[in-house]
Image: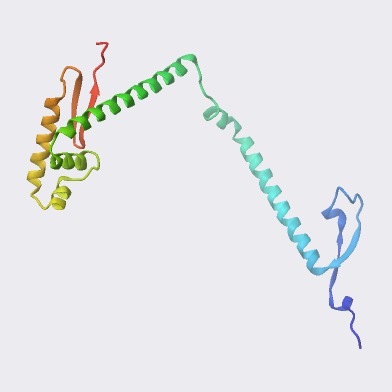
């Protein structure tokens, strides 16, 4: 007995209106292989799931609208706040310029020092190494490194014009700020 191809493939009837409502206005049934019907049903369920999630989130965010508008959407761009922001930006730029000038001056002073003191000071101040780490690298006692750094700091302070600079010693080195010339 010869089996036809139709006997091997199981078929299901699907309603085309369910999958293509714009194209088929009435219920139209069509027989398709079972695999195709399962695939169409799976895609329809995934699409419905994503649509329902979308509707949920839209509803949820609309419920929160009063809270969101009270907290995030209120930006007070008054002339005073804009002026304050612009002044802060100008101060920040001025401070950056002052820092650049001060670092140039410090490097000029460091160029006059001996190479070992310069190397130690740069490792301590810029790289942030500890005195003990520098001592281990150079195979010397940490007290000699400490004395060298203190001497370097003092020599830098001596070479600076005290009328133009305000000195602040920090644990990571020397940070210098120019005094206001208007004072």
Residue sticking out furthest to the top: 182
Q: How many discs mark residues in the rendered view?
A: 0
With respect to residue 146, does 177 lie above or below? above
What residue do we see at 78% from left, 60% from top? 40
**Residue 68 left/right relative to 98:** right
16 or 94: which is nearer to us?
94
Can you tell which quarter of the image residue 128 is in?
A: top left
Residue 122 percent location from the top left of the image: 21, 40
What residue do we see at 9% from left, 50% from top? 140
Which quadrant is home to the N terminus?
Answer: bottom right
With respect to residue 14, does 82 lie above or below? above
**Residue 151 left/right relative to 29:** left
Can you tell which quarter of the image residue 70 is in?
A: top right
Which quadrant is home to the C terminus?
Answer: top left
Residue 44 percent location from the top left of the image: 76, 56
110 or 178: which is nearer to us?
110
- The colour style of the image is rainbow
With respect to residue 124, does 103 lie above or below? above
59 or 112: which is nearer to us?
112
Residue 22 percent location from the top left of the image: 86, 47
57 or 10: which is nearer to us?
10
Can you tell which quarter of the image residue 130 is in?
A: top left
Residue sticking out furthest to the bottom: 1
With respect to residue 106, does 116 lie above or below? below
**Residue 20 left/right relative to 112:** right
What residue do we see at 13% from left, 25% from top? 159
**Residue 38 left/right relative to 154:** right
Residue 42 percent location from the top left of the image: 74, 60
């Amino acid at each position: 007995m010869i089996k036809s191809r139709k006997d091997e493939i199981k078929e299901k009837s699907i309603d085309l209106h369910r999958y293509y409502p714009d194209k088929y206005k009435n219920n139209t049934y069509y027989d398709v292989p079972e695999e195709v019907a399962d695939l169409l049903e799976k895609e329809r369920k995934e699409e419905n799931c994503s649509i329902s999630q979308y509707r949920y989130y839209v509803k949820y965010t609309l419920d929160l609208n009063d809270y969101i508008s009270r907290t995030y959407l209120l930006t007070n761009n008054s002339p005073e706040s804009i002026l304050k922001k612009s002044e802060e930006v100008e101060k920040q730029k001025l401070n950056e310029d002052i820092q650049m000038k001060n670092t140039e001056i410090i490097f000029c002073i460091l160029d006059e020092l001996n190479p070992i003191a310069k190397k130690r000071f740069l490792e301590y101040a810029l790289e942030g190494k500890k005195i003990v780490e520098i001592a281990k690298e150079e195979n010397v006692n940490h007290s000699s490194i400490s004395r060298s750094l203190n001497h370097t700091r003092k020599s830098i302070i001596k070479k600076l014009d005290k009328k133009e600079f305000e000195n602040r010693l920090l644990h990571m080195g020397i940070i210098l700020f120019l005094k206001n010339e208007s004072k």
